[in-house]
Image (cartoon, rainbow, N blue to C red):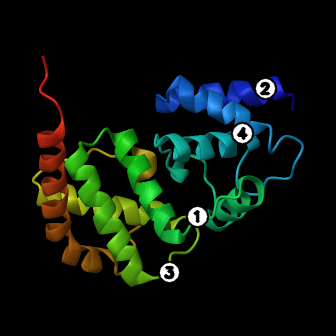
Amino acid sequence: MSIKSHEAEIETWATVFGLSNRTVELAKQLLQKVIGKKVYSMSRAQLALYVASIITGEYIPLAYFSAQPKLVRYDLRKFFGIELSPEKLVEIETRGLCRVLKLDRVLCEASVCTAVNTFNELKILKNRRYTALALVAIRLVARHMHRWVSLPRHMFSPLLYGAGKIARKYVEACIDKAKTVATQLQQQSPPQT
């Protein structure tokens, strides 16, 4: 596969996710580190774009790349020197889903808080269960805030045993924390003219 076809794949995915030119250009630069190398977690273009999205904060959920989190963490460490803890992977997955679902800041931050706290209590998530955990958190937080979140059909996943019960313990505190942070940020931002 030529470098041009890898770059075309990056641009296609970037269009799907509505990523900025900054993320696309960074992904093309990062692609140079994996060209000609054996990548285990996903395609080279996807890996470069995933890393770029983490660096720029325009997170992409792994659910779209069908990647094994363990292999993703291995590739990130091997090719980019990025040490990604499982907690950080849960956070990135949740933020990525928030982005794709176009959730507001409070709902997103409360979902991230809920997912990470739930993970810390669960301790183990096998294979692609990071997405399932993120979805449990988003659904619970949305329901608690009396909101409806419409999930694309391909995102429906089997229930994560025990996660809902654990997550319920954190939802209220996480929503309060997210609202407090959002209020503080609003007060700090200059008035619109």
- The answer to whether residue 161 shows anywhere in this view is no
What residue do we see at 17% from left, 62% from top? 177
Tell me the residue that label 3 is attached to.
124
- Pointer 4 local density, CA inside 10 Å: few below 14, some 14–19, many at least 20: many
| Label 4 vs label 2, nearer the camera | 4
N-terminal label among 4 and 3: 4
Q: Position of residue 185 (x, y in %)?
A: 19, 44
CB under 8 Å between discs 3 and 2: no
Tell me the residue that label 4 is attached to.
30
CB under 8 Å between discs 3 and 1: no
| Label 1 vs label 2, nearer the camera | 1
Q: Amino acid at mark 2?
A: Ser
Q: Position of residue 182 (x, y in %)?
A: 17, 48
- The answer to whether residue 38 shows anywhere in this view is yes
N-terminal label among 3 and 1: 1
Tag 2, which secondary structure? Answer: helix
> 137 or 31: nearer the eye?
31
N-terminal label among 4 and 1: 4
Q: Amino acid at mark 4?
A: Leu
Q: Quadrant of the N terminus?
A: top right
Does residue 6 appear to the left or right of 181 in the view shown?
right
| Label 4 vs label 3, nearer the camera | 4
Structural distance between the alpha carbons of marks 4 and 1: 17 Å
Tell me the residue that label 1 is attached to.
84
CB under 8 Å between discs 4 and 2: no
